[in-house]
Image (cartoon, helix red, strand yellow):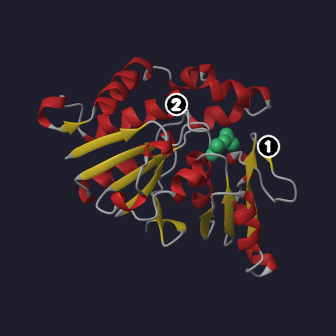
Amino acid sequence: MNIDLYFTPLQIQDELALQNKTVIVVDVLRASTTIATALKNGARVIIPTASVENAVKYASTLEPDSFLLCGERGGKIIDGFHLGNSPFEYTEEKVKGKTLIYASTNGSVAITKTKYAKHSIVAGFVNISEVVRFVKENSNDILILCSGKLNRFCIEDAVCGGMIAFLLTNGKSRKRLNMSDSVVASVKLYKSYRKNLLKMLKESEHGRFLIGLGFEDDLRVASEVDSIQIIPVYSDGVIKALR
Ligand code: MLT
């Protein structure tokens, strides 16, 4: 098994080179958490877009009652959109049966960059074991893609990426597997934070930013390991729950 990890989507030089890889996209705060929550609560599909303009353009092709425009800029709901990016907004009452057109600053952009991948899967702490189980059964060449923040490193995505690698390899040493240095470093980070993931989120740059906006409860939801049994798969431009 080969495992590599990119700390930001900027490291993708050639999207076509992902063709033979399984890519696991990680945006713990908050895209991965919110996407898993929306699918758990019955969203039909989620269409990630790389910009707000693309989201609005896409919406204009759909029946008015069939979709919700979702996402954030600067952590806040976008003007004229139906939902922001807090998982608490994605209730069954709001999202069941709907197409969600989703534009977040980093997560949805990272996901759209994986369109040529053999498999593209969205993971956070909330659905980590489900994703690892699927990937173990279906893949040999794995890239963990951290969404980061505006093409910069985010500790919460690296820790989650490290946990994914740790679980994929059952904690075995690097000698027996092909792990990149970024994977080895992320596994070490995970090991040093695993006792208190919520504390790590609260101390992170983006965590502190979200707390400042009044979203502290979102961090608690994002830290809940295996609370959601969903594998969100991105294929043909849409994210669906694997059945
Ligand atoms: C993103 O995709 O940039 C994040 O999910 C931002 C956020 O916390 O809303």
Residue 72 drawn above or below residue 38: above
Residue placed farthest to the right in the image? 80
Residue placed farthest to the left in the image? 176
Q: Residue at 69% of width from left, 57% of height from top?
A: 51
Residue 32 drawn above or below residue 175: below
Give the left or right position of residue 238, taking residue 61 as reference: left
Q: Of the residues under marks 1 and 2, which one precedes in the sequence?
A: 1
Q: Is mark 2 on a helix, strand or loop?
A: loop
Residue placed farthest to the front in the image? 13
Mark 1 Cα-neighbour bin, 10 Å: few <14, some 14–19, many ≥20 = some
Task: Provide the residue designation for mark 1.
Answer: 76
Mark 2 Cα-neighbour bin, 10 Å: few <14, some 14–19, many ≥20 = some
Task: Provide the residue designation for mark 2.
Answer: 153
State the CA–CA distance, disc 1 to disc 2.
21 Å
| Quadrant showing the C terminus | bottom left
**Which of the two residues, 62 or 232, is positioned nearer the viewer here?**
62
Q: Which amino acid does label 2 sit on?
A: Phe
The percent coordinates of residue 182 (x first, y second) are 34, 31
Q: Residue at 80% of width from left, 31% of height from top?
A: 214
**Which of the two residues, 176 or 10, is positioned nearer the viewer here?**
10
Q: Residue at 73% of width from left, 80% of height from top?
A: 61
Picture disc at residue 100: none
Q: Is mark 1 on a helix, strand or loop?
A: strand
The image quarter containing residue 198 is top right
Q: What residue type is labelled 1?
A: Lys
